[in-house]
Amino acid sequence: MAATKSKAVYNVYRALSHGLSPLLYLHLHWRKLRGLEHPLRWTERLGRPSLPRPPGQLLWFHAVSLGEGMAAIPVIKQCIQRRPDLTILMTTTTSSAFEVIEKRLPTGVIHQFAPVDTPSAMDSFLGHWKPNAIVIMESELWPNLIMGASEKGITLALLNARVSTKSFKRWSGPLLLPLVSLMLSKFSLIVPLSNMQAIHFQLLHAPPFVINFSGDLKYVVEEFDISEGEIRSIEDLKVHLAHRKVWMASSIHKGEEEVILGIHKVLMQQYPDVLTIIVPRHPQHGKEIAQQLWKEGHGVALRSRHDKLVGDTNLYVVDTLGELKHLYGLTPVAVIGGSFFPTLSGHNISEAAAAGCAVLTGPYVGHFSRMVLEMQRLNPLSVLQVSGKIELEDALKKLFSDAKILEAHRTAAKQVYHSLSTGIVGKVWSLLDFQILQRALS
């Protein structure tokens, strides 16, 4: 009875997604005109590949955005090292992720935009690439993808698996639970972020025997090459910042700049030489911040213009992508944005910790709350979670006023990061090899 209901719900979804295909085509075309889709490769989103499939066995990794894509890269590198006979296909959805990940992927990995989840796009994509196995990152549960792969005998894995509180409530309801449980039954491996996430997946009827643990892949910060020009630019900034009070607010969302700039004004009164580095989540937001600050007469340098830190420049706005890891090396203090308003849900703090920054974050961190708690459990100094603007202001003043306290926080963050990140990729590889590759590629 339950299986019949699950299949019926899926059939309704498939019919609806088929009926909406013309509207989705128009929507993608509209996004392309607005610069939100790749101008030349947007048709890949319709399942139309831009490259031929190489001969041999193929493993498909799928991630929706930049954070999930970056988390997949260490596993991809491990796969290439252990199984050089495999062709690796990587797909992402967002243009911002595509631009950055394209530069970070190892040579030989095929990178395409992910198809929308309509029957025609997904059937076309699967029919062309014919993957032997699919590795999905985090929570990209799309019915036509999963059911289409299952019907073709393609093995499925879900890494860094998580479901938000909001999604869990929605998926647990009588309407969606049959479909979600049907999709989860098709996976041969689910690697959840935590014990709580494992419980969520079991309550959504994932088979208990496919759930295994490895650690959070977002702890793994990959080394990657940057151009000589980028190296010179970073080194030049280090020289200019050597004798100044510096702090960075990274991955900030619209509205959070008001919090950061308010604190910047207060710090300027006590430390006239302070430099505040602002790294918005989206580059266009950075340009908008800089324009507004110029209008108000502030001394602002904009990274995309290669502005120098001269004279009265006390604000440095970064409106580029893919440089955050190296920019963390410029600052002793990093405030992780996306965490100061209730509608937001935090960002990855591991890159800042790996760089040896004193790490601060706001109260709204979503599923990153587990990362914060794990780090604080090992050393309370490794992450400071503040309740809002006033507490953030007080914490920054304390860090700037006492070099020993600042150094203690920086050391704690780096040590805890190394403790938590060690061995994760190896554990993930062992699970993938045993439960996916040996089964799918035998």
Image: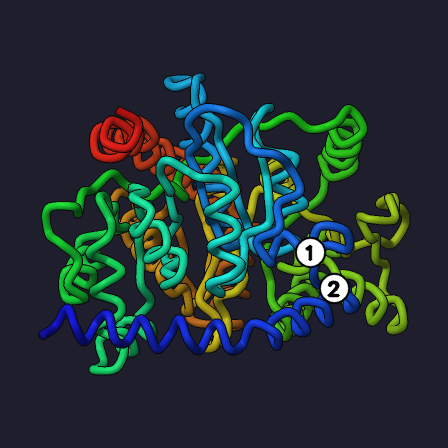
Q: Residue at x 50, y 40 (%)?
A: 129
Quarter-of-image position of residue 56: top left
How is colour applied across the structure in the image? rainbow
Q: Residue at x 31, y 57 (%)?
A: 162
Relative to 273, say whether 141 is above or below. Answer: below
Residue under circle 2?
32
Name which residue type carries label 1: Trp
Please tell me how crowded label 2 is: few (under 14), some (14-19), or many (20+) other residues with Cα within 10 Å.
some
Q: Residue 15 location in percent, x, y? A: 41, 75
Q: Earlier in the sequence, mark 1 or mark 2?
A: 2
Drawn side of residue 92 relative to residue 311, left or right: left
Report helix, strand or loop for mark 1: helix
Please tell me how crowded label 1 is: few (under 14), some (14-19), or many (20+) other residues with Cα within 10 Å.
many
Q: Residue at x 55, y 47 (%)?
A: 333
The answer to whether residue 42 shows anywhere in this view is yes
Residue under circle 1?
42
The answer to whether residue 404 shows anywhere in this view is no
Report helix, strand or loop for mark 2: helix
Name which residue type carries label 2: Lys
Drawn side of residue 1 relative to residue 77, left or right: left
Quarter-of-image position of residue 25: bottom right
Q: Residue at x 10, y 52 (%)?
A: 208
